[in-house]
Image (cartoon, helix red, strand yellow):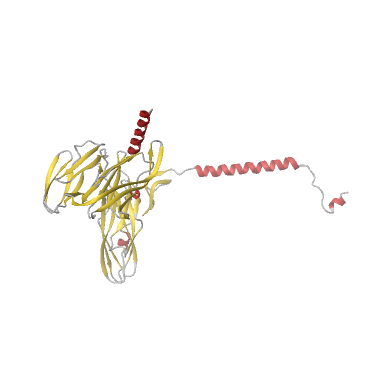
Amino acid sequence: MRKISLFIFAVLVISFASAVEFNIAEEYPQGGAIITKISGSFQEIIEEENIRFYRGTVRVPMDFELNKMADEYYLYVSLVDKDPNNYSIVLEEVEYLQGANVIEEDLERNFTITEEVADFSISKGFIMTEDDFRITVQNLREVRINMSYEFLEKETIELFSGEIAELDFDISQAQRLELISVKFSSENTNYEIPAYLLGEPDEKEPIMFEFESDSLNVTMDLVSQTNRTVFLKNTGTEEIFLIKLSLSEELERYTQLSKEELSSVEPGFLYPIELLFVSGELPSTTEGQITAISSGTKDTVNITLKFFPDYVESEEEIGSSIRTCSELGGTICKGDCDGEEVLSGDGDCCLGQCVEKSSSSGLGKAFGWFLLIIVIAGVTWFYLKKYKGVEAPARGIFKFLKK
């Protein structure tokens, strides 16, 4: 019986000890880094807001990163520029399962930054990527050091005092969807960084668009305004869901965009973007740009504004930005437009597909009138059926005369 009790006690102790895994070293050198794993059956997602750092009892800022990889959390804390002292990491208000019980408490781990200086610093404590990656290291010692690093192959570099090196890692030959260690070592400092390599990125056609013209010149009178239109075209084969538009700082005082973004940009159409220009009060020339950008792809139109006194715009200048619907690549629909509808030189232009007008509203109205007629006919028939041939009762003086 005693052996069984001791066995149960041992199991409970092990269960308690292993409910949450969150281990750090007791001491770290200056300029070093804390790299640790946090695992357990957490009831809520651990956020960066849950993590606090203290020097003694005083809360202090720390550069750190937290991420979840392969169902476990990884924490990286940079100790660069931190003075020797006693510190602690606290995971506040964490809920986790311990057996069948839900425990809510703060998890605290203490450590000391010593007078010793790490051989080198590292910029990352974990990697999660689908592409090649880069890690930056710096020699923190007053003498040169030899440092080796290993991902798929082992290499060695020499770093002079204070030298910074950017190390590139090629993942083309690495196994995907699993954790792989990236190791760094010198005479006195060692790091092992977990790297989780995601699956191959999907092959997607790059986003392609361009303005119809790469420049626009506008000349106008002083203290006046005028309108111009520039056209943007999706030159690819896939729909672009969002293109953002912006003006350079030089133009913001004199120019207003009709829209700051284009959504659902279909291939093959010219999308008009209207510009309102307001001149200054003195003769001058201003140059700037309108920029369209989407997913890292961008195109620009260089705009030159000239303000001259008593300048009169010609009809050719004013009408130069007018396009017919066919020039925009659209259609003037007899029915509804399934897409963006814009104003063209020959009417409302559909930049999409034309669809037949729905006749449901007309049928609904006709059915409503039909029901109303039936109701009126029914009421009339009921009235005539009930009161036909019945003499109306005499009222007032006629009541006595009838007698």
Q: Work out whether residue 378 or residue 38 is closer to the camera in this orientation and state it.
A: 38
- Which residue is outermost to the right? 403
Q: Quadrant of residue 20?
A: top left
Q: Quadrant of residue 254?
A: bottom left
- Which residue is outermost to the front? 2
- Which residue is outermost to the top? 1
Q: Residue at x 14, y 52 (%)?
A: 141
Q: Work out whether residue 11 or residue 81 is closer to the camera in this orientation and state it.
A: 11
**Whether residue 367 can be seen here:** yes
**Whether residue 31 can be seen here:** no
Where residue 113 sits: x, y (%)?
Answer: 23, 51
Left/right of residue 197 with respect to residue 50 in the rendered view: left
Where residue 361 sits: x, y (%)?
Answer: 51, 44
Where residue 175 sits: x, y (%)?
Answer: 22, 35
Q: Work out whether residue 117 or residue 333 is closer to the camera in this orientation and state it.
A: 117
Left/right of residue 150 with respect to residue 307 in the rendered view: left
Where residue 291 sits: x, y (%)?
Answer: 28, 56
Q: Work out whether residue 158 or residue 287 is closer to the camera in this orientation and state it.
A: 158
Q: Quadrant of residue 82?
A: bottom left
- How many labels, in total? 0
Q: Is residue 301 above or below residue 264?
A: below
Q: Residue at x 34, y 36 (%)?
A: 13
**Quadrant assignment for the N terminus:** top left
Q: Is residue 355 above or below residue 247?
A: above
